[in-house]
């Protein structure tokens, strides 16, 4: 028995041809897929803000992984004991248990619990991050957040005798700058338990989040022998303020460096000095790097309310070799600018 299907005859033994698509597939096999004209049946959707947010979060994961971090996934539901700095939280109406009664207000408690487990198992270095959502009781809002924790040694050392030191505040700041693609500014703020030190992180005028170091007692409770540094950032603000890092070719001409020995008030932030130098508009200035800080609480060599900063200035031109006279002139202009704006002094 043969069944006539439009202009095609289907053999009776082909019981698998039941739908239009089954017959279309057989036609493509007979005449060849290349003989069938293509047709665009749908247009790709225009990328929206949700796509941009997803791509940025994936970029954060890739960049943090490239910086040596491991991603952690902690629970969104936490107990009252895991509320970060006693921040008001949203409580579930019908929780499964008291250990899952609240929506988390921060990613840090879960990460610190993971750090404790790693330390208990003998890890000498722990670098964990998470990208997830946090929830605020005020306004019942949820926010995309990223956080990371640093604890332990920079490296395990080796036969070459590389120096080993503890990961600290400056390492965490460097990670934030790698994520933001620009220099960030820290502003001290009041530290509340379990933090001993805390500061807000700014990119321009935008507040990205906060950075802190656990109090020694809180670090010992985790089993850590050295400092434990934590950072938490708002993903949306970070996305709006971040920029693509510029890339340039390897310089063909040598750089020239000059050192500044600055004496300034002890409470003057280094960020103000660096900002003044960069905003001076010196086209030859390529880099600013501090390499020494000296204070004397006794007041014998330096007044107790003053500090001495040693800063290295790097000058370079992409198209020629610099002359000593023009480098000295640029350095002198920078000195005068610092003296005029910040009223600093210089040690010869």
Image (cartoon, rainbow, N blue to C red):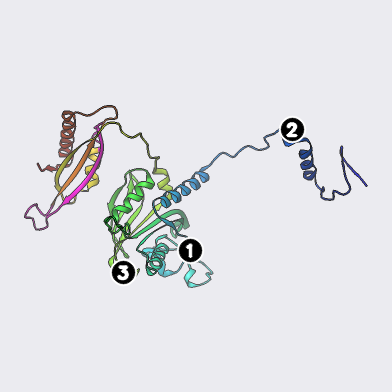
The label on residue 196 is none
> Where does residue 206 sit, x and y in percent of width and height?
35, 46
Give the label, 2 or 1, closer to the camera: 2
| Residue sitting at x 38%, y 67% | 116
Sequence-wise first label, 3 or 1: 1
Relative to residue 140, is residue 102 depicted above or below? below
| Residue sitting at x 30%, y 31% | 252
| For the residues bearing labels 3 and 1, Cβ distance under 8 angstroms | no
Part of the protein shown in magenta: 278-305
> For this rendering, which residue is in front, 13 or 18?
13
> Which quarter of the rendering shows the C terminus?
top left
The answer to which image quadrant residue 134 occupies is bottom left
Give the label, 3 or 1, closer to the camera: 3
Inter-mark Cα distance, 2 to 3: 73 Å
Q: Secondary structure at mark 2?
A: helix
Give the residue pinned by disc 3: 220
Determine whether, in the image, residue 20 is placed left or right of residue 203. Answer: right
Q: Secondary structure at mark 1?
A: loop
Q: Is residue 196 magenta?
A: no
Give the residue pinned by disc 1: 75
Q: Secondary structure at mark 3?
A: helix
Sequence-wise first label, 2 or 3: 2
Give the label, 2 or 3, closer to the camera: 2
> For this rendering, which residue is in front, 192 or 251?
251
Give the residue pinned by disc 2: 35
Determine whether, in the image, residue 278 is placed left or right of residue 299. Answer: right
Q: Main secondary structure of the magenta part?
A: loop
Determine whether, in the image, residue 94 is placed left or right of residue 88. Answer: right
Inter-mark Cα distance, 3 to 1: 24 Å
> Where does residue 157 sit, x and y in percent of width and height?
30, 58
């Amino acid at each position: 028995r043969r069944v006539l299907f439009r202009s095609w005859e289907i053999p009776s033994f082909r019981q698998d041809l039941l739908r239009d698509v089954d017959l279309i597939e057989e036609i493509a096999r007979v005449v060849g897929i290349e003989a069938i004209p293509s047709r665009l049946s749908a247009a790709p959707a225009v990328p929206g803000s949700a796509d941009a947010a997803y791509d940025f979060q994936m970029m954060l994961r890739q960049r943090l992984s490239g910086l040596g971090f491991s991603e952690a996934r902690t629970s969104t539901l936490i107990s009252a004991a895991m509320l970060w700095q006693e921040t008001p939280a949203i409580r579930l109406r019908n929780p499964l248990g008291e250990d899952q009664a609240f929506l988390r207000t921060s990613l840090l408690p879960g990460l610190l619990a993971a750090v404790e487990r790693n330390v208990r198992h003998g890890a000498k270095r722990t670098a964990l991050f998470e990208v997830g959502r946090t929830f605020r009781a005020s306004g019942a809002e949820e926010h995309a957040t990223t956080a990371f924790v640093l604890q332990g040694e920079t490296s395990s050392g080796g036969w070459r005798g590389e120096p080993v030191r503890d990961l600290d505040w400056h390492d965490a700041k460097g990670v934030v700058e790698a994520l933001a693609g620009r220099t960030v500014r820290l502003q001290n703020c009041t530290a509340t338990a379990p933090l001993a030190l805390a500061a807000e992180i700014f990119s321009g005028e935008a507040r990205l989040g906060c950075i802190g170091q656990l109090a020694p007692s809180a670090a010992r409770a985790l089993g850590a022998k050295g400092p434990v540094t934590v950072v938490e950032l708002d993903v949306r603000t970070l996305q709006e303020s971040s920029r693509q890092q510029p890339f340039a070719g390897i310089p063909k001409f040598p750089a020239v460096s000059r050192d500044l020995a600055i004496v300034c008030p002890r409470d003057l932030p280094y960020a103000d000095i660096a900002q003044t130098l960069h905003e001076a508009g010196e086209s030859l200035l390529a880099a600013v790097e501090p390499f020494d800080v000296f204070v004397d609480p006794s007041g014998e060599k330096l007044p107790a309310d003053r500090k001495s900063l040693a800063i290295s200035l790097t000058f370079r031109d992409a198209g020629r070799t610099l002359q000593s006279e023009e480098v000295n002139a640029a350095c002198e202009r920078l000195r005068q600018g610092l003296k005029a704006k910040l009223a600093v002094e210089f040690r010869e």
